[in-house]
Image (spheres, rainbow, N blue to C red):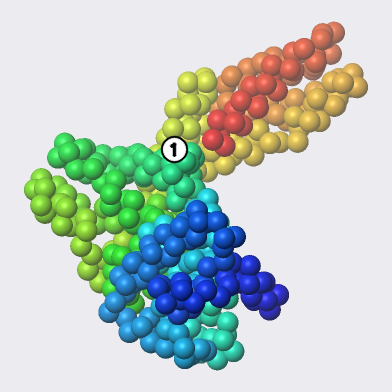
Amino acid sequence: DKKRDEYQDIKDTYLTTSKNLKKKLSPSIDILSDNKMNYFYQDNKILELIEKDMKRTYPEITFFQEKSKNNKKETNCDILKRLLFIYSKKYPEIAYVQGFNLIIANLFYVFSQDENPYFNLFAEEDTFFCFELLLHNFKDIYNQEKDRSDKGIKNIINYIKYLLYIIDSELFLNLNNMKIDIYMFLFKWYTVFFSQEFEFEITLKLWDNFICNEVKEEYLIHLCLGSILIKKESILSKDTGTILDALQTFKQTDLELILAKIPQIKISLMEHALSIRAEKLQEFGVDTKEGLTRCMNKETFYFRMITMGLSNDSFEKLEKAISENNLDEAFEAAHALKGVLGNLALTPIYKPLSEMTEMLRAKKTADYAAIYKPIMEMRNQLLLMIKS
């Protein structure tokens, strides 16, 4: 209820009465201006963009042209205009972007259809904050100044292309050889969260999965990849018209095919990541072949065991014992680590640790802190490799 009251305050901040603008644009939107023409012009321009896009917002769904349940003087479409305008005023760095009309329409429709009439009363308020929260993690994709940042749209699309190459190089190279750039398809899919590709009811089903997913950015990337992969037969036809038609035409049954692809996509990407880790470890001197053999050639299990081995508290016990010049405890800790690291075939760290263990066994006088320092540095390096 506090958030709903907050929305009323937001409305009061960004909306006021203006008969001229009411007549020109909408029965439910008024402009708050400081009497400077540039502000008036900017607001008016945004409203015209919103008005233009609202005419194309699911025209086949009569709900959006119907009168609001809570206010018969306005339509549901008028409420969407108001929501989008308020968002554009609250977040001027993004303002309004084409496609927001579809995103907010999906949310408002669902809130308005709630079986509990109490929640229907606050469909506008709940839609605003849900829209705000949803766009929070995606805001950089709508900001041109951040196009090439980590979360910018160009960087994300390039990343999706890279993942496509990893998963299916044949498909990727065929698109490349045909000089078909999938940028425009990926851009549309990603920026409006697949709001244009399916019939409305199917879109809501897709959104049910999307909204409930904790890692929405990753899930959206997987949806993009799945949408291309299910079109492989058409893409390999090497006919430009067939390929373009396939990438912009989705049937009702395609969603199930896309969703079925996602587990396979995750497995392929995980296997690739494990392969890269194995190569890095081999370059560092780790005998991964021997280590994997000891772990029944299960890469995931092997890397998990390496992480556990390198995180063993015996490293800290050994360091503490050395600082206290307690050679007996130092030997016990070193001997325990030697067995663990040897079983994992972590040769670069195993060899110097093994030599130090024998020195401690014989209680030789030595600068153990100096001997142990490069061992710890290698341990930290290995941990970074395994976690990257």
Q: Which residue sits at x=65%, y=33%?
A: 310
Q: Can the viewer see residue 43 in this picture?
A: yes
User: x, y (%) of residue 268?
Assistant: 37, 46
Local secondary structure at mark 1: loop
Relative placement, left or right, of 327 versus 182 is right
The image quadrant where one finds the N terminus is bottom right
Against 240, is 114 above or below? below
Quarter of the rendering occupied by the C terminus = top right
Task: Tell me which residue sits at (20%, 38%) in the image.
Answer: 176
Q: Nearer the viewer, residue 310 or 54?
A: 54
Q: Is residue 296 visible?
A: no
Q: Is residue 348 above or below residue 198?
A: above
Identify the residue position indicated by label 1 in the image: 148
The image quadrant of residue 165 is: top left
Q: Nearer the viewer, residue 357 or 71?
A: 71
Give amino acid for label 1.
Arg
Q: Looking at the rendering, which quadrant does residue 168 occupy? A: top left
Side of 244 relative to 158 (left or right) = left
Say if 327 sits above or below 191 in the image.
Answer: above
Counting from the top left corner in percent of width and height, residue 54 is at 36, 71
Q: Residue at x 42, y 35 (%)?
A: 275
**Residue at 28% over, 65% down:** 197
Residue 216, how many percent across, how many down?
Answer: 48, 57
Residue 347 occupies which quadrant of the picture? top right
Residue 124, position as x, y percentages in the image: 53, 77
Local packing at callout 1 (Cα closer than 10 Å; few below 14, some 14-19, many 20+) is some
Nearer to us in this view, 261 or 133: 133
Q: Compared to 275, does 231 lie above or below?
A: below
